[in-house]
Amino acid sequence: MLIRIQLLGSRSLRDLQTSIKMIFKTDPHAHIDNHSWLQCHYLDEHDWLWKTDGCETQTKQNNKTDIICDCDHATPFAVLLMREPIAQVHWEILSYISYIGCGLSAFFTSLSIVIYVFSRNHRMDYSISIHVSLSGALFLLNSAFLLTEWGATVKPDWVCVFVAALMHYSLLCCFTWMAIEALHLYLLLIKVFNTYYKHYLAKLSLAGWGIPFVIVAVSLGLTDLKQFYGVTQITMTNTNQTNAICWITDDSFYFLNLVYFTLIFIFNSGILVAVTSSICRMKQALRNNSKLGAEFEGKTWRVSESCRSGLTVLGLTCLMGTTWGLVFLGTGYVNYPILYLFCILNSTQGFFIFLWICLSAKKQRKRNMDDRMTSTPVKTSGISSHDTSFPAMSLDDKAQK
């Protein structure tokens, strides 16, 4: 129920010495847990936001279902059911997880880049080049995230704007390179082999780094009309603690990120389902055509192959960033298991990609050694010369099967 108190004409009542007392009847059968409460609010018709300043909430001693609102101004009033977004103890734990995970990922993504730069064998491998490009985007994202609190305390103000814009750019780059990972996987595993694309890696790099740059550059170019980046205050609910960070200042601008990621998430999820289905069909065909000796050995082999296929799918899930989709399950009421999974998996994504690159490089070296020993030419995809290997599955094996 909403109560509106107003004077005729344009007159208003504010800063009253004698407050206006209103009694709201609530449902006596409604269940309110320990993390929820009822609180008096008024509607600020200028900002169109529910606010609490100037209003106090009380309950009757003999009737807990009646909520008393004492307010020093006349506006639309209502009693809202509030729920604490994140408890302070969980806030601190999640913050530590995020900072440790991002620091770990920043180190290993930089290590991936260094190894790639000084390794000549991998420069012609398009898959590893794309992995390293994603690692570079994650390195920028993790580094910018670690600077967000520092940037909010530094003068001049353009430092914080730069950090916020860098973080937004690197976030969009990560999403774009995740989509490129899915596209590359589609071309290798699902579409066709022996397909040649001129300047393939250059075109992917132009899209991976260029599209986010255009978005951020346009946002920065509109500074005179709207300031999108700067200091943002984060306040923990039901506490006086605030945390200033450098990030997007306009809430409506988050819609762009949401739409951008949603489209990429749908595309990557479709590719992941198709690749998983392809892996299952390949393993089933291999299982039907294999001649196994003993029943025990057959079970052991099936378990081993299932584990390898499962690890491959998990690696692809991390590589294409589908774990970021947990954000859709974290909307609304707080779900702590989802929050912890989101922080752990996504803050350490750079570390898992480093492991993936190492396993892929090891698989590639083993294949090159086998090729030199047998002196047998290997038929590779036209998309990428000397391409490509996965830790648990070889594309050459698929071509032979």
Image (tube, rainbow, N blue to C red):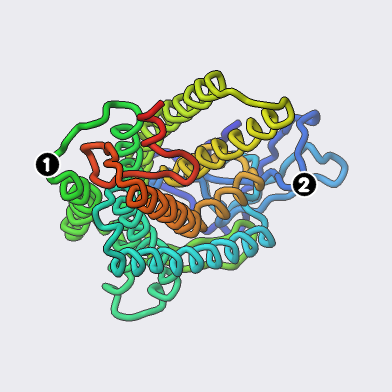
Provide the secondary structure element on which disc 2 rests: loop
| Quadrant in which the C terminus is drawn | top left
Give x and y (percent) for residue 346: 50, 52
Residue that carries the numbered disc 1 in the rendered image: 198
Q: Residue at x 29, y 59 (%)?
A: 121
- Tag on residue 34? 2
Give x and y (percent) for residue 38: 69, 43
Q: Residue at x 40, y 30 (%)?
A: 398
Farthest residue, direction left: 198
Q: Residue at x 41, y 71 (%)?
A: 147
301 over 392 or under it: above or below: above
Provide the secondary structure element on which disc 1 rests: loop
Task: Report the amino acid beneath label 2.
Answer: Asn
Farthest residue, direction front: 374
Q: Is residue 43 left or right of residue 383?
A: right
Judging depth in this view, the residue of 83 and 153 nearest the camera is: 153
Q: Is residue 8 left or right of residue 291?
A: left
Task: Report the amino acid beneath label 1.
Answer: Lys
Q: Residue at x 73, y 50 (%)?
A: 58
Q: CA distance from mark 2 to mark 1?
A: 61 Å
